[in-house]
Image (spheres, helix red, strand yellow):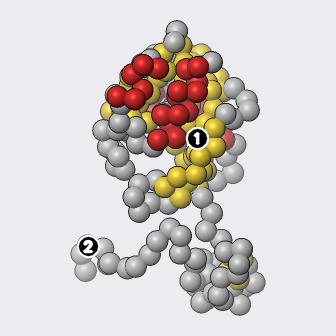
Amino acid sequence: MTGRLDISFTATEPFRFCPADGSRLGPPRPSGGATCPVCGRSWYRNPAPAVGAAIVEDGKALVTVRAREPYRGMIDVPGGFVELGEHPVDALKREVMEELDVEVEVEWPPVMFAPHRYGDDGVYALAIGFRARIISGEPSPSDDVADVLRITRDELDALAFAWEHDRQFIRNALRR
């Protein structure tokens, strides 16, 4: 068989089978979780945590152009998904290094939280935004970044951001 099967599934649909043992799960509880009758574990559909950086220097914010889907060619902020067991600050440092080949210092606490979909039919994510500054290196696009731009507040509204919350995130960072 070649190609993918067309199986009805959405990111909001509760799990139907236990990821641990494959048993059919009971009906979803009001909280959204479902319990496995065999192993007793509860399973929930939770958003995937993602991190993003607002890097501002001399009145300009560093933004990226996406090289991959979803939203290829649109404006984004440096960042990405948090790996299992990883602290969000460490995830942001790793992602910025992977995407731009620079080391950043991340300011605590986070300054933005925004739930969103990663693509039209993608997973739900929880974006966590931090202010950051480059402490080593010159930004160079790599990984899933096609280009790096430095923009002013006046240029924000003319750009096509992949996610509207990132436009507001950068707008707020430029106010500071």
Q: How many marks?
A: 2
> Mark 2 and 1 residues: CB-CB less than 8 Å, in contact?
no
Task: Describe the element under mark 1 as helix, strand or loop.
Answer: strand
Q: Is residue 153 above or below residue 142?
A: above
Name the side, left or right, on which 134 lies relative to 1: right
Q: Position of residue 114 (x, y in %)?
A: 59, 46
Query: Could you tell me which quadrant the C terminus lies in?
Result: top right
Q: Which residue is mark 1?
A: 51
Report which quarter residue 88 is drawn in: top right
Rendered residue at 64%/43% (across/down): 113
Q: Position of residue 133 (x, y in %)?
A: 59, 19
Q: Nearer the viewer, residue 172 or 55?
A: 172
Report which quarter residue 34 is drawn in: bottom right
Q: Nearer the viewer, residue 114 or 35?
A: 114
Q: Is residue 18 above or below residue 84?
A: below
For marks 2 and 1, the one nearer the N-term is: 2
Q: Nearer the viewer, residue 61 or 105?
A: 61
